[in-house]
Image: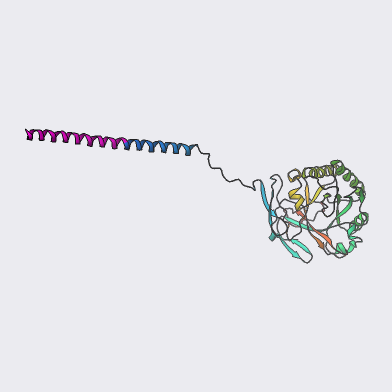
Amino acid sequence: MQIFVAKKMHQLYSIRTKKIKRCDCLKKKIVAGVCAAVALSLALVLGGCKKSEEPTLPPIDPHEGMVEVSSGMGTLMWVPFFENVKLNEFEAEDFYKADEFIEFSGEGYYTRRGIDVSEHQHEIDWRAVAQAGIDFAMIRAGYRGYSAGGLFEDAYFRQNMEGALANGIDVGVYFFSQAVTTEEAREEAQFLLELISDYDISLSVVFDWEQIGTVPARTDGVSGAQLTDFAIAFCDVIEDAGYNPMIYLYRYIGYFLYEMGRLADYDLWVGAIGSYPDFYYKHQIWQYSITGSIPGIEGDVDLNIMFVRAPAHEGYPKPPILN
């Protein structure tokens, strides 16, 4: 009897032990399943978050729509780019110094030596100037005052015109503008036309607006859009009278003030002191020095090069008119 009871007890213990083991195994499977489900849920959540993130944008270019140019002071600067304006075709290696002058050695153009003068040069011996190899002169005809805004004829205008022409030097003229309205720009053009009516002007008639800077001036605060309006108004009057209009500018007002895209149809005369014409856009005359020395002129005088596109054949004469 005791043996029978012992066997039964052993059987019951074995059955219970198996049930406990099966239960433990089931619990482990359940836990493992729950962990797997949680892991999958986290993966889906995290994966969903990544998919909903904003796409990475490329870095913003701070110089978009700009071009890097020479400042004229040994450094580079970024300026607005005008795609409809023709570009300067010249390279530094196209130019070399020859005594007082800078000469061009590139192809496609020939150059003419020139000066620009006003009453600041006083008496000029034009015969000596011609003998020094000067081909052309840009002569100031008049100016507007920067304070009260009066219109004035240059004190040496007529003397300079007659002296240059008498010695075979081709002439263009310029008016120093201080216009603050388009009406004043047109008034300046009409005033200039009256001054030059008796002379043979073979070169351009130039609008020369400059900032005064050193003292307060009536033009302080003129915007780039306004200045561009003035230049166009002046040039329209000059062109309607049958002359070739041109605009004089220097680096700063060319890059930062004038709306160059609106001046694409006009010839340019650029003051950019240096060893080669580094102004980014195409120009017909380059003023490269304001401290030149020429026989026949006492003191400093501005030196210029005119670029004339060369014909395809050899032996061409030098025409007096820009093309």
**Extreme left residue here?**
1
Q: Nearer the viewer, residue 115 or 322?
A: 115
Direction from residue 126 to residue 109 in the image, left or right? left
Picture quarter containing residue 264? top right
Q: Main secondary structure of the magenta part?
A: helix
The quadrant where residue 317 appears: bottom right
Q: Which residues are the magenta region? A: 1-30
* Percent coordinates x, y for residue 308 in the rendering: 76, 54
Quarter that holds the N terminus: top left
10 vs 159, left or right, is left
Where's residue 192, x and y in %? 89, 47
| Most foreground residue, 311 or 52 | 52
Q: 60 or 118, which lies in front?
A: 60
Q: Quick check: 19 above or below 151?
A: above
Q: Is residue 125 above or below residue 279?
A: below
Where is residue 47 shown, x and y percent of the image?
Answer: 44, 38
Residue at left offset 87%, top offset 53% = 140
For the question of whether residue 225 can be seen, the reply is yes
Q: How many marks?
A: 0
Question: Residue at (19%, 36%) from the top-left corner?
Answer: 17
Q: Is residue 3 magenta?
A: yes
**Res 323 seen here:** no
The residue depicted at 32 percent of the width and 37 percent of the height is 31
